[in-house]
Amino acid sequence: MEVLLVAFHYPPEISGGVARSLALEDYFVRRGDRVRVLTPQPIDRAQRGGELLSVPLPGLLAAPPSDAGGAPRASRNPLRRFARRWVFVPDGFVLWVRRAIREVAESADATPFDLVVTTAPPESMHRVGAFLKRRSGCAWLADFRDGWTFEPHRAEARLPLRRAVEKRLEANVVERADWVTAATLPIAEDLQARFPAKRDAIHCLPTGFTKPETGEVAPPPDRFELVYTGRMSLSRGTSAPQVFFSGLVRALAEDADFARAFRLTLLGRFTDDERAIWSQSPLADVVQELAECDYVGAQRVAAGATMLLLLTPPNQRSIATRKLFDYLAVERPVFALARGNEAARILESTGAGACVPSDDPAAVADGLLSAFAAWRDGRLDREYPRDGNHRFETGALFEDVLGQRVLAGISPAP
């Protein structure tokens, strides 16, 4: 089968969207399909055995490298930021889509596509699927990593007039696509409720994980080590980091044994503002920051933790980030600031960890001391057995949803 995968987020990027793009590419390649990956990323070849269709970003959208420890310099250009957010709908990357469609048309003329998969955000990626569906009648799978108008990830999409426009654009995608997949259950259920005629074509497809090769790693026997990997600044402006550290300060003050045995290891890229949170006593005495490393190295550090720290923003039901699945992959218990959202549901259903509210420092302190007591008494692995983690391995997830419910009805183009 001939498959086009439209993957805006792709290596050398390291965002959460990259993991889903690679998982989709890997799945179709393993099936024996020919996969053409359409992306703007500056790369020489596809990463999982596909063929690369590279279309560079227009100058207005191309961002220069980021400053050390800071945000990309392009994001500070007010004219560029204004144009990307307010001039183009649903997002500024429609400019890239116009270029990309020309490349896609030439590739399709040479060898037609049987299936186009558009994974978003950016939501403008779905225009490629609509174009090919209209032009050649090929099958189209629209993949929602985030809710487009359900808990919008873009601030402008929350404004009433803009929200109405984007709801119409979203409806066009859901109604015209042959299938829709959503990365979390709340997103899928929201779409099924709003588009009942498409209910049977809308499926929840978690990104899941592929088990890493970390080697034999054991948690330290003499200390309670909590490990956090990744960037705190990517938590969508959430207050969860401040809430966690406030709770940690309380726990350190309340229990001297905890204070002596506890260590927090941070592995990732952090800003000066974030470092200011843990640079003062008593946090400075228990927090260590490791140099950024590659994905395998980060997973090896995670595999050696007593517990893993997950931060999620309050009042967002659809949150279940790549970090959650990375943590499930190494099979260590998780301490999560997550309550009433998809991350909490997954952790509770798998027996993978403890969940406390994301906005309550006192609950964080109580949760930390409770987890510490379980570790000290040798009960931690019994309380959080992780016996359901295997249900989120990518291979089985994708085969169940894509193989059994989507692809069975596609006939290759003549």
Image (cartoon, grey):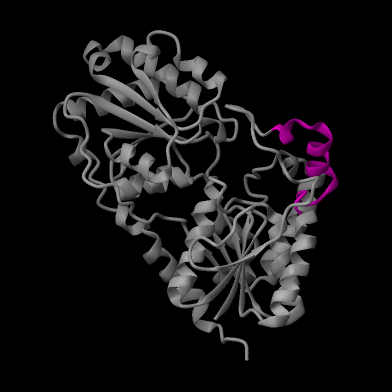
Q: Main secondary structure of the magenta part?
A: helix
Q: Does any portion of residue 172 appear in the rendered image?
A: no
Q: Vertical placement of 383 versus 3: above or below?
A: above
- Asked if the magenta segment contains residue 85, the reply would be yes
In the image: residue 189, left or right of residue 150 = left
Look at the image and tell me whether residue 340 can be seen: yes
- State the residue at coordinates (69%, 68%): 129
Specify the quadrant that holds the N terminus.
bottom right
| Nearest to the observer: residue 292 or residue 26 | 292
Residue 138 against residue 141 in the figure, above or below: below
User: Which portion, as a residue range, is magenta?
Assistant: 73-93
Q: Residue at x 60, y 52 (%)?
A: 9
Number of marks: 0
User: Relative to residue 85, is residue 18 drawn left or right?
Assistant: left
In percent of width and height, residue 357 lies at 44, 30
Q: Residue at x 53, y 45 (%)?
A: 14
Q: Going 62% across and 44% down the picture, which residue do you hit?
A: 151
Q: Position of residue 106 (x, y in %)?
A: 74, 75
Tell me: 84 left or right of 321.
right
